[in-house]
């Protein structure tokens, strides 16, 4: 059976037989069981697809908003119980890595989220199915949908099952430290403040945006640097600032 999704909107009249089969296949490999498959399908519906659909279609952004909060709660509670000797700052640091875009995108790829996302043609042509931001957002939407469908307990089991390895990586200091995090840690330690990121401009059509961001550090401005989303642009300008500051320290 092909894993590529049939591009059908999550409409109230129901799902096609083929789409139901695809979603049931996803459930099996991801370890979830929805009472309402339409809710799971909505979690896969990216804004680009909803905008191109001839029917009035919803997208997964509201579910993503909810899923982000549920994910944060579950991970925060788990770390609170697990690391009972750590200060609040340490818990926040660990959590930030666990729920980062890189971490969530990696989990999304493991459960083949990219095979089931419904995206618009423009986003498809620009490689949207493999973009970290879209994968991470979709995973959060799935979490939000699962919470609405089945409640917190099954959702907690799902989250911890798939993210426990990411938590262990951070605790064992084997995780990837991105430049944005490195810059923040450096600035906090040296200047007792935080870097400030500013969106200078954005160019291009909706499906192929380019974002230009600069960062202000202790009165000095770096950038702007560009990226295909805000997080990527922030990483680029953080790399520039960190490299300059680290060189000054040498």
Image: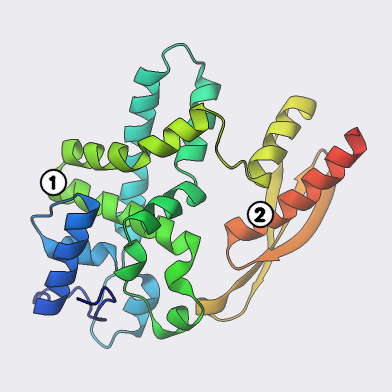
Q: Residue at x 57, y 64 (%)?
A: 229
Depth check: give the residue in front, 62 or 249: 249
Which structural element holds mark 2? helix
* Front position in the image: 161 or 211: 161
Q: From the image, which quarter does the N terminus lie in?
A: bottom left
Q: Which mark, residue 131?
A: none
**Which label was assigned to residue 150?**
1
Q: Mark 1 touching mark 2, by CB under 8 A?
A: no
Q: How many labels sit on residues?
A: 2
What percent of the width, then of the height, locates residue 134?
A: 43, 63
Residue at image x 21%, y 66%?
Answer: 41
Residue 204 sits in quarter: bottom right
> Going by the picture, which residue comes out furthest to the front?
1
Q: Identify the residue position indicated by label 2 in the image.
A: 234
Instruction: Calculate the distance from the C-alpha at mark 1 to the C-alpha at mark 2.
Output: 36 Å
Q: Is residue 122 left or right of residue 78?
A: right
Q: Locate the C terminus by quadrant.
A: top right
Seen at 56% across and 30% down, the residue is 173
Q: Is residue 16 visible?
A: no
**Picture layout, residue 137 above or below residue 155:** below
Q: Is residue 100 visible?
A: yes
Left or right: residue 241 compared with residue 109: right
Q: Residue furthest bottom?
A: 54
Q: Quadrant of residue 42?
A: bottom left
| Residue drawn 20% across the image and 38% down it | 152
Q: Residue 62: image x %, image y %?
A: 32, 58
User: Taking 82 as reference, is 242 left or right?
Assistant: right
- The secondary element bearing badge 1 is classed as helix
Q: Camera-side residue: 133 or 203? A: 133
Crowding at mark 1 (Cα within 10 Å: few <14, some 14-19, many 20+): some
- Relative to 148, does residue 173 appear above or below in the rendering? above
């Amino acid at each position: 059976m092909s894993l590529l999704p049939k591009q059908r909107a999550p409409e109230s009249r129901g799902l096609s037989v083929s789409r139901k089969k695809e979603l049931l296949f996803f459930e099996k490999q991801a370890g979830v069981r929805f009472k309402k498959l339409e809710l799971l399908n909505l979690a896969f519906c990216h804004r680009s697809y909803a905008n191109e659909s001839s029917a009035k279609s919803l997208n997964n952004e509201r579910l993503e908003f909810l899923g982000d909060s549920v994910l944060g709660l579950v991970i925060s509670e788990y770390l609170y119980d697990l690391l009972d000797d750590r200060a609040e700052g340490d818990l926040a640091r660990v959590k930030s890595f666990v729920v980062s875009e890189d971490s969530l995108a990696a989990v999304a790829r493991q459960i083949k989220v990219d095979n089931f996302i419904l995206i618009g043609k423009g986003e498809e042509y620009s490689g949207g199915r493999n973009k970290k931001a879209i994968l991470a957002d979709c995973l959060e939407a799935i979490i939000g949908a699962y919470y609405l469908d089945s409640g917190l307990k099954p959702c907690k089991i799902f989250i911890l099952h798939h993210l426990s390895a990411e938590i262990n990586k951070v605790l064992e200091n084997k995780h990837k430290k991105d430049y944005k995090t490195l810059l923040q840690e450096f600035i906090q330690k040296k200047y007792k403040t935080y870097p400030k990121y500013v969106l200078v401009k954005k160019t291009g059509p909706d499906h192929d945006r380019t974002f230009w961001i600069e960062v202000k550090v202790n009165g000095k401005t770096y950038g702007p640097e560009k990226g295909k989303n805000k997080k990527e642009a922030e990483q680029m300008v953080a790399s520039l600032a960190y490299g300059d500051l680290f060189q000054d320290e040498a």
